[in-house]
Amino acid sequence: MRTVLFFIVTCVSNYGLSHDYYFAFAEIEYNEMNSRFECTVTASAHDIEPLQEKLGLFIDSLSDPHSLSATKAFEFLKSHFQISAETQNINMNLIGIEVMLNGTLNFYLESEEVKLNTGTFDLQFDLLMDVYAEQQNKATVYYRNETYTGHFLHETRTQTFQIHNEEIK
């Protein structure tokens, strides 16, 4: 009887202490040479699974950027990862998707040419927040030798980044 009671208490305790977490992150660099943002967005393939049926995705075919699954995944990503500057959304292009052996997906993106006259841009990064209540995202922006970080939660889905105080030429 003690063994059964110990087993039940242990299971209930572990269930109460454990929690699921969902996390995506992005690395963004503004390349002054070509006036483009270069981005990597990383998410767990496991976290993307609920979207497979909904969007008709096949994880195995995501590595081909011309596949229907890659196109659908990119369209979904664009609606949840958006850079805007001076009140205009910046168009992003899919460079590729890499399915990693560690179970993550890397989406490689590049923006159209954009001049950051004020050095300020907004980033909406609410990827998977409509799927998971616990979803949290983080973006790291690299510009020159500086690093800027933004944390994205359900109540803060958009962050403003000031990467330079002087006018960017």
Image (tube, rainbow, N blue to C red):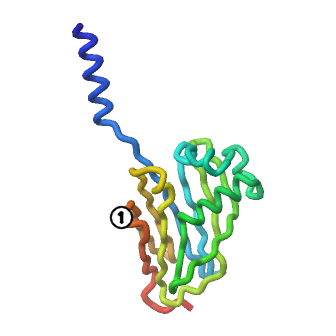
Q: Give x and y (percent) for residue 156.
A: 38, 66
Tell me which residue sits at (64%, 71%) in the image. Answer: 92
Q: On the rendered structure, is 90 left or right of 149?
A: right
In the rendered image, the residue lying farthest to the front is 54
Instruction: Examine the rendered structure and indicate whether residue 50 appears above or below residue 109.
Output: above
In the rendered image, the residue lying farthest to the right is 66
Tell me which residue sits at (68%, 69%) in the image. Answer: 93
| Quadrant position of residue 67 | bottom right
| Quadrant position of residue 32 | bottom right
Residue that badge 1 annotates: 155
Q: Give x and y (percent) for residue 157.
A: 42, 66
Q: Give x and y (percent) for residue 19.
A: 35, 40
Tell me which residue sits at (73%, 47%) in the image. Answer: 61
Q: Quadrant of the C terminus?
A: bottom right
In the rendered image, the residue lying farthest to the left is 2
The residue under label 1 is which amino acid type? Glu
Q: Specify few, some or many for label 1: CA neighbours under 10 Å numbering under 14, 14-19, or 20 or more.
A: few
Task: Tell which of 109 and 55 is nearer to you.
Answer: 55
Task: Tell which of 75 and 159 is nearer to you.
Answer: 75
Task: Tell which of 108 and 144 is nearer to you.
Answer: 108
Q: Quadrant of the N terminus?
A: top left
Instruction: Examine the rendered structure and indicate whether residue 22 appears above or below residue 26.
Output: above
| Quadrant position of residue 37 | bottom right
Instruction: Examine the rendered structure and indicate whether residue 15 appears above or below residue 29.
Output: above
Q: On the rendered structure, is 160 left or right of 36?
A: left
